[in-house]
Amino acid sequence: MREGRRGAGGAPAGLGGDDRAVSVTVGYVLTLAIGAVLLSGVVIAVGGVVDAQTDRAVRGELSVLGQTTAANLESADRLVRAAEADNRPDASADATVSVAFDLPTRVAGIPYRIAVDDESVVLHTDRPDVRVEVPHAVRSDVEATSVRGGPLRVTYTSAGSGRLEVSER
């Protein structure tokens, strides 16, 4: 009879000297590591693109909403000037104007604020940090205010402050 081959230390060659199982395990671990590195690289690259796209979308929407707000402020200003022109010195009526308009409460899923003063309408968000300024051509005095986006109203009462004021509805 033949006797089986023996490896170093007297152990059968098939059991003691075989290290092929290590290469399968190492290959599996390396494959997982390479996959994880590639996946994290893709996530980081796509995350930057998504952030830039969100920033661009927010800026565009804020610009449109700023122009809408400025247009409504200018409309209220024209109504104020027309109402005051109609008031004769002997009339006892006060000029009162109210213009209501609706804006969304969020842009790209992000809340925003609107600041209004004598020169411009400024819209801004915190995350991402975006600020858009839209000038307006209002001749009347404007009360400097800051409101959340959403349903708004521009009011004027000559008996009151005599200024246009933007407020939340």
Image (cartoon, rainbow, N blue to C red):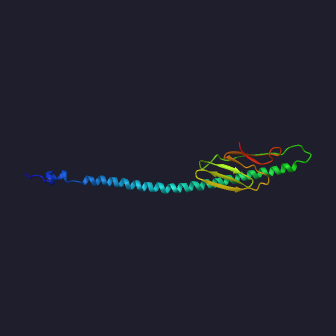
Q: Is residue 136 above or below residue 99?
A: below
Relative to 123, 5 lies left or right: left
Residue closest to the eye, 55 or 115: 115
Q: Position of residue 16 (x, y in %)?
A: 19, 51
Residue at the spot x=39%, y=54% of the render?
35
Q: Residue at x 59, y 56 (%)?
A: 56
Q: Quadrant of residue 34?
A: bottom left
Residue drawn 50% across the image and 56% down it: 46
For this view, does 161 lie left or right of residue 151?
Answer: right
Can residue 43 be spotted in the picture? yes
Residue 88 in percent (x, y) is at 90, 48
Measuring 81% from the left and 49% from the top, which residue is drawn there? 80
Residue 142 locus on image (x, y percent): 76, 50
Is residue 7 visible to us here? no
Q: Residue furthest right?
A: 90
Answer left or right for 41 relative to 118.
left
Q: Residue furthest left?
A: 1
Q: Position of residue 13 (x, y in %)?
A: 16, 53
The total of numbered circles placed on residues is: 0
Q: Which corner quadrant holds the C terminus?
A: top right
